Amino acid sequence: MPSNQIKQSYKLSNGKINNLLAENRVAHDWYRFVLSFPPHLVEQYLQKFKVTREQCVLDPFCGTGTTLVECKKYGVASVGIEAHPMAYFASQVKTDWTPDPDGLLEHSYRIAEIASNELEAAGIEDNPFFPTSIDNTKLRLLPTNSQNLLITNSISPLPLHKTLVLLDHLKRQVDERYITYELLALAKALVYTISNLHFGPEVGVSSIKQDAPVIASWLTGIRAMANDLYELQSWTNTPVTVHCFDSRQVLSMLEPESIDVVITSPPYPNEKDYTRTTRLETVLLEFIHDKKDLQALKRNLMRSNTRNVYKEDDDDLWVASYPQIQDIAEAIEARRIELGKTSGFERLYAKVTRLYFGGLMRHLANLRQVLRPGAQLAYVVGDQASYLRIKIPTGQLLANLAQSLGYELISIELFRTRLSTVTKEQLREEIVVLKWPGKGKNTLK
């Protein structure tokens, strides 16, 4: 596809507007966070902002690389920041289209044959239609510290054993040209085929599968990657840089006045623990090994849920003088007391609300120095009612904070509505469109 080709405007129903469309699946579908925003939304704002090849786009909450992949397809340089190591890894792989697809297939088939031979020697078929009878005491296990991080029953013993055998041979027969693609394909297979997980939208465990195809599912992902690479390698090889870093500290990572456009979607203020959603693949690919690693990961994330609030957190100080946010936090606390809610997490609802908006404020304040005058920004955010049914108008509050820091508010545009599982009301997801005029960029709050 020519990198400057303008696609059609998407006319989708509210229920489908967040879906990954068939025409966008190339590269995006290698591994995608279940709550990712859609590629066609990025396309829309690349066009709306009239982004050119001479400009640079930043996604400071880049997740699994939706903005970065789309920018690369359009021939526009981009930079991503992502604190979660699994998502950061996915973004890196999905934006590198250099490997030889034939070589990837050849190496992966060889690994598959070796791993299959080991399983067959132990009487294990990689086919759930041919039940395996094997003593569970002979199956491979994760170290106890790692196993304890997983959602209970998220993967059954036999599929776990087969996965660990495959991982072992990937390490033994490693080829640096292909290993990251092979691991990412396994991550996707783990989530959607091998595990017992389901997303609706919370992560949970569905019916327990005693067995599941592991090597076959993995190879399906490898073949899809190879097919995409045949196509992608004919496109412009536009540079993409990804940093594994805390987005609240962009100033220490990026050059002053180096960014023309921001297209991003920060986490929403609710009780979704984003590390839990990706826990299985994060553990099995060894990005974390124990609770200490998990805590270190959480400390670098925006405080968007009570599972990653710590005693020393002080982002709330950034919004101490903002009455709208204080009023919402106080309303949440008053409702908690009224309802007699006393759990440790419920006691943190008001605090995490202040920390969340303080973190956004800190991010926006530091971001000013890396933006060029006239920079355009699009933030996809959603209203929330997770904390005892007190509505949090995230888009409007973000816009107010940005304006107080010198940003110009261009518009707050409706992306879609979604049904609140708490209040059963329709909540707005919006795109807050801002402009940085270049004034006062050296004055941080």
Image (cartoon, grey):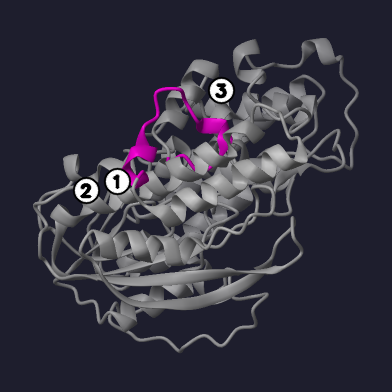
Q: Is residue 50 visible?
A: yes
Q: Residue at x 43, y 59 (%)?
A: 265
Circle 2 residue: 366
Circle 1 residue: 362
Circle 3 residue: 168
Left or right: residue 223 versus residue 102 is: right
- Range covered by the magenta-colored residues: 302-320
Q: Is residue 307 above or below residue 78?
A: above
Q: Is mark 1 on a helix, strand or loop?
A: helix
User: Residue 434 sits in which quadrant?
Assistant: bottom left
Callout 2 amino acid:
Asn
Camera-side residue: 298 or 306?
Answer: 306
Residues at marks 1 and 2 touching, judged by CB atoms closer than 8 Å = yes
Q: Does the magenta stretch include residue 116?
A: no
Q: Residue at x 36, y 43 (%)?
A: 320
Q: Is mark 2 on a helix, strand or loop?
A: helix
Camera-side residue: 282 or 219?
Answer: 282
